[in-house]
Image (spheres, grey):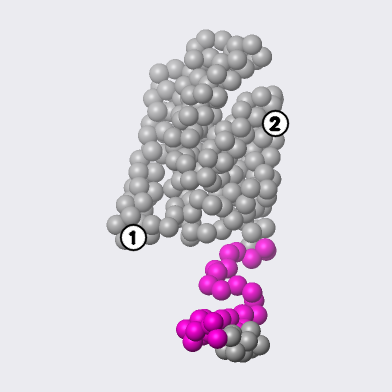
């Protein structure tokens, strides 16, 4: 009130400017800002995502020449959106620990964790996640895999060549599934990679991709596994 009164007394302040002076602020201190999930809801999300990551990696289906399809990173990237970078590290740690225990060595698990961090960082900065994951495997992941499986933990042929092909495919599939899951969540949250273009045609197309092509992909994986079993 006193600011407005002083402005009225000032001959250099016009009537329009005087009306624009703020007299009082909202008691909450924020104007027009949406509210995200409550701390309790974020904690429940975090625990659920960590459990899902553990189950997805420990009970990963075996496809493509005895190589497991590990999808724990999907839940880490979802945790980035819902909980933010620091809490999401709990889910990533769950992924590392599960794969370490399952495979009996930490190197492959740390390589997958490095993929999760690299793609998640690029995703939060607005980069295309699929291209980011492809770039990771071209310039970082595959060279590290070659060194790991030739110098540190040598594996025989043809498993060596299969690993170099299957790991990038696994990463791209996990990224694609995470994209589909995140697209079903409302924009916002703690992350910075929500979708703002919610026009009807875009939503319809993404729903078709999520619920139309995913069953085809799952059926294809089972068909490949069945064909491989009969071939052996």
The answer to whether residue 132 of the structure is visible from this angle is yes
Q: In this figure, which residue is indicated by the disc labeled 1?
A: 199
In this rendered view, identify the residue nearer to me: 223 or 172: 172
The answer to whether residue 65 of the structure is visible from this angle is no
Q: Position of residue 188 (x, y in %)?
A: 52, 59
In this rendered view, identify the residue nearer to me: 10 or 79: 10
Prevailing secondary structure class for the magenta stretch in the rendered image: loop
Tell me where the magenta segment starts and ends, as one range: 11-40
Label 1 environment density (alpha carbons within 10 Å; few <14, some 14–19, many ≥20)? few
- Residue displayed at 68% across by 48% down: 86
Tell me whether the residue at label 1 lies in contact with that at label 2, contact meaning CB atoms closer than 8 angstroms: no
Q: Position of residue 18 (x, y in %)?
A: 53, 84
> In the rendered view of the protein, which quadrant contains the N terminus?
bottom right
Q: Position of residue 224 (x, y in %)?
A: 40, 28
Q: Based on the picture, tell me whether residue 79 belongs to the magenta stretch.
A: no
Marks 1 and 2, how far apart in space?
45 Å
Q: Position of residue 94 (x, y in %)?
A: 67, 41
Q: Disc 2 on helix, strand or loop?
A: helix
> In the rendered view of the protein, which quadrant contains the C terminus?
top left
Q: Disc 1 on helix, strand or loop?
A: loop
Q: Is residue 157 left or right of residue 114?
A: left
Q: Is residue 158 left or right of residue 29?
A: left
Q: Is residue 90 above or below residue 99?
A: below
In this rendered view, identify the residue nearer to me: 55 or 33: 33
Q: Earlier in the sequence, mark 1 or mark 2?
A: 2
The extreme left residue here reads: 201
In this rendered view, identify the residue nearer to me: 22 or 93: 22
Q: In this figure, which residue is indicated by the disc labeled 2?
A: 101
Q: Based on the picture, tell me whether residue 13 belongs to the magenta stretch.
A: yes
């Amino acid at each position: 009130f006193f600011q407005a009164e002083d402005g009225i007394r000032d001959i250099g302040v016009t009537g329009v400017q005087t009306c624009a002076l703020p007299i009082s602020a909202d008691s909450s201190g924020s104007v027009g800002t949406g509210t995200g999930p409550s701390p309790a809801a974020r904690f429940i999300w975090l625990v659920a995502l960590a459990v899902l990551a553990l189950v997805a990696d420990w009970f990963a289906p075996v496809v493509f020449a005895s190589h497991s399809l590990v999808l724990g990173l999907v839940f880490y990237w979802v945790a980035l959106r819902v909980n933010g970078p620091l809490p999401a590290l709990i889910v990533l740690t769950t992924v590392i620990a599960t794969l370490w225990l399952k495979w009996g060595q930490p190197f492959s698990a740390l390589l997958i964790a490095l993929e999760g961090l690299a793609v998640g960082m690029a995703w939060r900065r607005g980069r295309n996640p699929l291209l980011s994951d492809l770039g990771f495997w071209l310039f970082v992941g595959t060279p590290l895999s070659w060194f790991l499986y030739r110098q540190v933990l040598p594996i025989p042929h043809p498993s060596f060549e299969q690993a170099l092909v299957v790991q990038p495919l696994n990463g791209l599939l996990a990224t694609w599934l995470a994209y589909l899951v995140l697209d079903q969540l409302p924009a916002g949250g703690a992350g910075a990679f929500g979708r703002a273009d919610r026009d009807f045609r875009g939503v319809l197309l993404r729903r078709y991709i999520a619920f139309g092509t995913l069953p085809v992909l799952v059926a294809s994986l089972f068909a490949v596994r069945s064909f491989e079993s009969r071939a052996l």
